[in-house]
Amino acid sequence: MIGTPAPAPDLTVTGVTWDPASPVETDDVTLRATVKNIGTGPAGPTLLDFLAGGRKAASAQVGELAAGASTTVSAPIGTRDAGTYAVTAEADAGDDEIELNETDNVAGAQLTVGPVPSSDLVAQAVTWNPGTPRAGDSVTFAVTLRNDGTRATAGGAHGITLQVLDGDAAVKTLTGSYSGSLAPGASTAPIDLGTWTAANGRFTVRTVIDDDANEVPVKRANNTSAQSLFVGRGAHLPFDMYEAEDGVLGGGAATVGPNRTVGDPAGEASGRRAVTLNTTGSSVEFTTGAATNTLVTRYSIPDAPGGGGIESTLNVYVDGTFLKAIDLTSKYTWVYGNEASPSDSPGAGPPRHIYDEANLMLGRTVPAGSRIKLQKDAANTTTYAIDFINTELATAAPNPDPAKYAEPAGFTHQDVQTALDKVRQDANLTGVYLPPGTYETAQKFQVYGKVVKVVGAGPWFTRFRTPPAQQNTDAGFRTEASANGSTFSGFGFFGNYTSRIDGPGKVFDFSNVSDMTIDDIWAEHVVCLFWGTNVDDSTIKNSRIRDIWADGLNFTNGSSGNHVANVETRTTGDDGFALFPAVDHRNEQQTGNVYEDLTSLLTWRAAGLAVYGGGGNTFRNIHIADTLVYSGITIGTLRFGSIPALGFEANPQTRFENISLVRDGGHFWGQQTFPALWLFSAEYAFRGIRISDVDITDPTYSGIMIQTKYSGGRPLNPVTDTVLTNVSISGARKSGDEFDAKSGFGIWVNELPEPGQGPAVGSATFDGLELSGNHQDIKNTTTTFTINRT
């Protein structure tokens, strides 16, 4: 032993209480905390923070404390809405003292605030259709009212005013009303308010409900609500989305959430809320805004006790009359254990990836304004979590030219391959038309020899299917350069992958080809829709990628000049959209790629968009929401294992423009937390990055995190030449979970020695930065990174 430690304080919180002891909504609440110095030396004056529900509520000064001494401090937090709040007190919140132990400064308790007798009329849901409008769309608005109070509302008319605001100016005002009394807990059907012709830009939708005569004043603050509306961001596909929590519940159905817990029905749901149907007769009902003859349901049902999934049904009603049952399975969900490489064995650890989707042709056209209900009846023998539904009016496309398009003789793999071969050998034929039907396949189709158009009747009608009784069948399409210029459009591809296998499982596995078009494709239960190695001047558009095990699509190894447009990914097991300039097959930089009008939802294992290098590539008009464990966008220069790659070019620059990141981020690789937007300088040059018009809302841990990789204790590459313009970050709250200390930052310049990392190195410039509602707007305790704010 060399010497003895110098005396030092150690501040801890020994108790958190409040006054009054059992408050109701009209009571002013005062929080109290007892702080004790359990160290060996005195503590100087410090600050204590009170948090309620993950947000800083108040602070209190703590005077000097001798070793062994304690004191009680208090701070008022005003009135609170009815509910239960996690209240925590953090001693030495400003890190003013060097303590013997810096990890024991926090204590907490659960504060319950009771309701006052009153009605409480709120906007349960404010919806618009289409959900991601573009300029020129006619956007229809509807409001669902709910009485969250303990008394019925008064009778008569309850007025609603909805305004679309551009800044403070109203560009559209719509009005409507509901007549009658609402019982406690009851909801109205959606109330149509009218339409607005959309224009590109950022808007706020403000909804005001007239005060109810039975509402006490304290319950009227929530009569006004606001939501962000971004026009021109995201994919615009031909279906409408209806969130279950916005529907009308019956028979004991319950809304769960919000939370951010992986493996939980709310935590893995869109908007982090869902509806459970656990008792016979429970239901959720939706009112259609447009005619439909189809239904997609995102759902979760239990796994089999030993893994492998179960089969079940759920009944579908239209306007109160039973129509048919939809078939559900958990065969393709429920993996367990380590987030990096989960297993399908329930014994491997905690669960994750619990949602799948099912689709159904209704068999008739259901008019706009109809009520579609999902109901658990006696024949539906399990429990259900419903996240959302999609509806669309689908029509089958005919053979574009029977004289030019061959048709398969049947629905086998060989029938289709024979038709492809026939087109290759006949100069008078342009392509293959795939009539409506289910085509069985268990291997790759080979397309070569000439330009070929493979055209289906539409993804609801022409569908490829791998053997349902098998697992992990590698099927899809391969092409050769002799078929450059080919098109694949208008069909679905439904695989049988129940786990991730790197290598096979790509529907389109293209190498060394160009001028390809993939259009109006629907893929599920495969590994990837598309993997492009040295693919140039090709287009992927108007497609939907759902419930797969790895990247939605990835261009790599010199792929340049490609266009990805109007594509949505949901529940991908790796990056939704990726660009990775690896050089293991072709040593060439990736340039001139454009990814635009994209939506990525509910990525369950990686980022919504990941860009790992390149130059002159543009990513714009993008909406990313509810990534479960990782960033919404990763901008990083990572080396993946032994695969060499290229970093970012200084010129031409890489641009990210007009993007929404909503409820993104999570924890991965053990103890690391990830933000909505992650800037990571690693093995290769990080430079030439331009980010503009990005709105980050309600991130799980932080809005933007900047990190640097180290080797041998030294940083590999700094962040340089990086400019962010017109970025807004709001709602970065303390998480309240085991990663609470790594949460609540609008911008976090990561100073921690995470595995293989250290304090971020370099600089970034922010021009027009807006920060609001964050626990801490900017955290940068490093001496190695500079934020330049103009």
Image: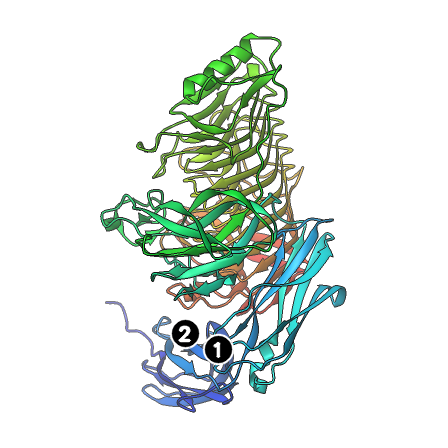
Of the pair 211 and 585, the residue shown nearer to us: 211
Compared to residue 361, the image places residue 111 above or below, namely below
- Residue 350 placement: quadrant: bottom left
Q: In x, y percent, where is residue 55?
A: 50, 73
Q: Residue furthest front?
A: 321
Compared to residue 525, the image places residue 666 above or below, namely below
Q: Which residue is mark 2?
A: 98
Q: N-terminal of the two: label 2 or label 1?
A: 2
- Which label number is shown at residue 381? none
| Amino acid at the residue labelled 1 | Pro
Q: Residue at x 60, y 43 (%)?
A: 238
| Amino acid at the residue labelled 2 | Ile
Figure disc tally: 2
Is residue 413 shown left or right of residue 652? Answer: left
User: Which color scheme does this rendered protein use?
Assistant: rainbow
What secondary structure is marked by label 2? loop
Can you see residue 784? no
What's the distance in space between the residues labelled 2 and 1, CA to CA? 53 Å
For disc 2, the neighbor class at 10 Å (few under 14, some 14 to 19, many from 20) is few
Q: In x, y percent, where is residue 138?
A: 71, 52
What secondary structure is marked by label 1? loop
- Residue 465 placement: quadrant: top left
Q: In x, y percent, where is residue 247?
A: 51, 61
The image quadrant where one finds the N terminus is bottom left
For disc 1, the neighbor class at 10 Å (few under 14, some 14 to 19, many from 20) is some
Q: In x, y percent, where is residue 308?
A: 28, 43
The image quadrant where one finds the C terminus is bottom right
Q: Nearer the viewer, mark 2 or mark 1?
A: 1
Q: Residue at x 46, y 76 (%)?
A: 51
- Which label number is shown at residue 184? 1
Compared to residue 264, the image places residue 557 above or below, namely above
